[in-house]
Structures are given as structure tokens and as C-alpha cells.
Image (cartoon, rainbow, N blue to C red):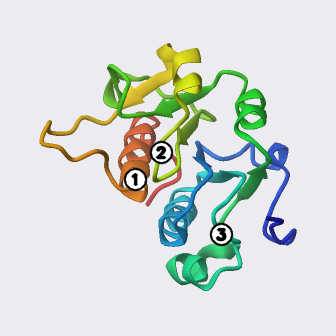
């Protein structure tokens, strides 16, 4: 699904972002809208990996972050492999299958925090290819499969920003 050119920037134009939040094949517009608002509030760049389960013109997506689209740095990648190649190893893959916990990582400015689609997470072959770059957010072992995507992104983003001492924040 082609996205409106006026909203999408070349990834090379987003170098000032403290972090790059990458959503792989997001399917639920309000989740992506919430993440877009988080990115606008923190200065992080948002990268969406196609195929998307919606157009970024969808009303539901706009409703979650409509007033903030002009403050959002947005790039779209045609596939996960191209996004991974773009970030050249400066990645952190968030998955419930990792053994390393997210708070033990030393995040560096410009790192990409990568999250899988709501229904399936990241592909196993990707996390298996980068086990040292795969991290998890701990949860109780009570049968809850995973956190909501936008909740997980918020937890991870603020932890990473804390490591930079919240640059440029009030």
C-alpha cells in the first residue's frame, strides 16, 4: 500500500533523532498512532516497515495522533531486511523470546528499537540471526502472551532515553 509522500521522509534525513522506533508490519492503526505521538513527544524518528495493515491516511490512525503529525519524523521501509541493513547492526530487537532483559542494555544515540507486528511479533529467523541484539521486557508467567505494542514501545523508549539523560527535555 503506497503511503502519502508528503508525510514520508528519506531515512537519511532523520539523523538527529535520539532513537529510531521501528514498527515491523504494524496492523492496528491506533497502536501506530500512539507510537507516532510518543515519537513526536520524544524526538524519536518513526520507521514503518511494509506491508502495513492500513494507510497512514486512515481516520483511526489520524485520530490517535492527528495534532502531532507535523512534529513527526517518519520513514517507510519496503521490507524488514532493508530496514535491518539500513541500521547496520545498531539495532535492538524486542521479543518475548529473548533471554536478555531490556534494562541491561547500554543504548546509544541513533540506535533502532525494533518491534514486530501485533499478532506475531518479529520473525524467529530475525531474532535467531541477532540473539545478542534481542531483548525482552519482563512479564509475569501468568499466561499473558505479550504487552500491547504501544505500551512496549513506550517502556523501551523511555528506558533508552533515560540512558541519554533525556536530551533536550523540559
Q: Nearer the viewer, mark 1 or mark 3?
A: 3
Pointer 2 residue: 120
Q: Secondary structure at mark 2?
A: loop
Q: Is residue 170 visible?
A: yes
Q: Secondary structure at mark 3?
A: loop
Q: Characterize the local packing of mark 3: few (<14), some (14-19) or many (20 or more) Cα atoms within 10 angstroms.
A: some
Distance in Å between CA atoms under marks 2 and 1: 19 Å
Question: Which comes before the other along the chain, label 2 or label 1?
Answer: 2
Pointer 1 residue: 154
Residue at x-position 56% and y-position 61%: 27
Q: 96 or 11, which is in the foreground? A: 96
Q: Is residue 16 left or right of residue 146?
A: right
**Residue 133 in the image: x percent, y percent?**
51, 20
Residue at x-position 87% and y-position 68%: 5
Q: 169 or 57, which is in the foreground? A: 57
Distance in Å between CA atoms under marks 1 and 3: 21 Å
Question: Which comes before the other along the chain, label 2 or label 3?
Answer: 3
Looking at the picture, does residue 10 appear above or below residue 121?
A: below
Q: 66 or 147, which is in the foreground? A: 147
Residue at x-position 55% and y-position 81%: 60
Q: Is residue 100 left or right of residue 120?
A: left
Question: Which comes before the other along the chain, label 1 or label 3?
Answer: 3
Q: Is residue 34 left or right of residue 162?
A: right
Pointer 3 residue: 54
Q: Secondary structure at mark 1?
A: helix
**Residue 106 in the image: x percent, y percent?**
44, 23
Q: Which picture quadrant has residue 61?
A: bottom right
Quadrant in which the C terminus appears: bottom left
Amino acid at each position: 500500500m503506497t503511503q502519502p509522500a508528503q508525510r514520508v521522509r528519506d531515512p537519511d534525513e532523520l539523523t538527529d533523532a535520539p532513537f529510531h522506533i521501528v514498527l515491523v508490519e504494524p496492523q492496528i492503526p491506533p497502536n501506530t498512532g500512539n507510537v507516532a505521538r510518543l515519537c513526536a513527544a520524544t524526538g524519536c524518528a518513526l520507521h514503518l516497515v511494509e506491508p502495513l495493515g492500513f494507510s497512514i491516511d486512515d481516520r483511526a490512525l489520524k485520530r490517535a495522533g492527528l495534532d502531532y503529525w507535523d512534529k513527526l519524523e517518519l520513514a517507510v521501509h519496503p521490507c524488514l531486511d532493508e530496514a535491518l541493513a539500513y541500521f547496520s547492526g545498531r539495532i535492538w530487537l524486542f521479543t518475548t523470546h529473548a533471554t536478555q532483559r531490556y534494562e541491561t542494555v547500554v543504548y546509544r544515540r541513533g540506535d533502532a528499537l525494533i518491534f514486530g507486528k501485533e499478532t506475531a511479533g518479529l520473525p524467529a529467523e530475525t531474532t535467531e540471526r541477532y540473539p545478542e541484539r534481542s531483548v525482552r521486557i519482563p512479564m509475569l508467567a501468568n499466561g499473558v502472551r505479550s504487552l500491547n505494542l504501544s505500551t512496549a514501545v513506550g517502556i523501551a523508549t523511555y528506558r533508552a532515553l533515560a540512558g541519554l539523560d533525556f536530551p533536550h527535555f523540559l
